[in-house]
Image: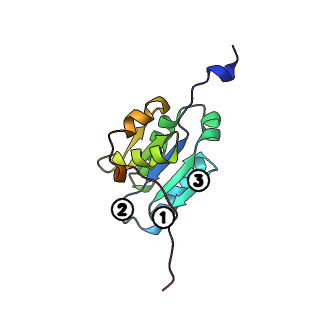
Amino acid sequence: MDDKMTQVAQPTVMHVRCPDRLPEDPCRQVLELLADLSPVVQALPPSCALVELKGALRYHGTDAAHLGEVIRIRSVSRLGVDVRVGIGLTITVAATASAQITGPGGVLAIPPDQAADWLAPHRRHDIHQPRPVCCWAG
């Protein structure tokens, strides 16, 4: 049997939330930590970021949940910032997962085959859709 046929989809999107009202400098430092993990990082102001993990999973030889724990530990130990990390197959699942973490930090990885069942009980306004933020000059 072909190896490509037997591969199971892995969650490859990481959504990272910094604590509310975190100053700009620590937020930038968290982004730099994320860039050490994967070259594909997008800041979502004011305090979130998206990370694409496809290449990082192969490079680091591990799964997405482990990489989420690595980022959280590095962020706490190096910067004193406890982040919330959501991991899923899509941006929506990852962003919703990071929003569901209670407490100051943690990692919640949603397996692709459980994403629909996991999202089903959430109310529509609890399902997060990252969208562009407009900045208005005053």
Q: Disc 2 designates what residue?
A: 20
State the scheme by which the image is colored: rainbow
- Side of 117 relative to 62 (left or right): left
Q: Secondary structure at mark 2?
A: loop
Amino acid type, residue under disc 3 in the picture: Val
Residue 12, how many percent across, how many down? 56, 39
Outermost residue, left direction?
Answer: 103
Q: Identify the residue shown where x is 36% and y is 62%.
A: 20
Q: Identify the residue shown where x is 51% and y is 47%.
A: 91
Q: Secondary structure at mark 1?
A: loop
Amino acid type, residue under disc 2 in the picture: Asp
Q: Disc 1 designates what residue?
A: 45
Q: Disc 3 designates what residue?
A: 41
**Residue 121, located in which quarter of the rendered image?**
top left
How far, Cα to Cα, is label 1 from label 2? 11 Å
Q: Identify the residue shown where x is 39% and y is 49%.
A: 127
Residue 95, how many percent across, how many down? 44, 49
For the residue carrying disc 3, how many other residues have a C-alpha within 10 Å: few (<14), some (14-19), or many (20+)?
some
Residue 134, how many percent across, how many down? 51, 71
Q: Circles 1 and 3: CB distance less than 8 Å?
A: no
- Observer-side mark, 1 or 2, equals 1
Residue 36 image label? none
Residue 26, how many percent across, how many down? 46, 62
Q: Identify the residue shown where x is 38% and y is 36%.
A: 118
Amino acid type, residue under disc 1 in the picture: Pro
**How many numbered marks, from 0 up?**
3
Q: Secondary structure at mark 3?
A: strand
Q: Is residue 32 above or below residue 122?
A: below
How far, Cα to Cα, is label 3 from label 2? 20 Å
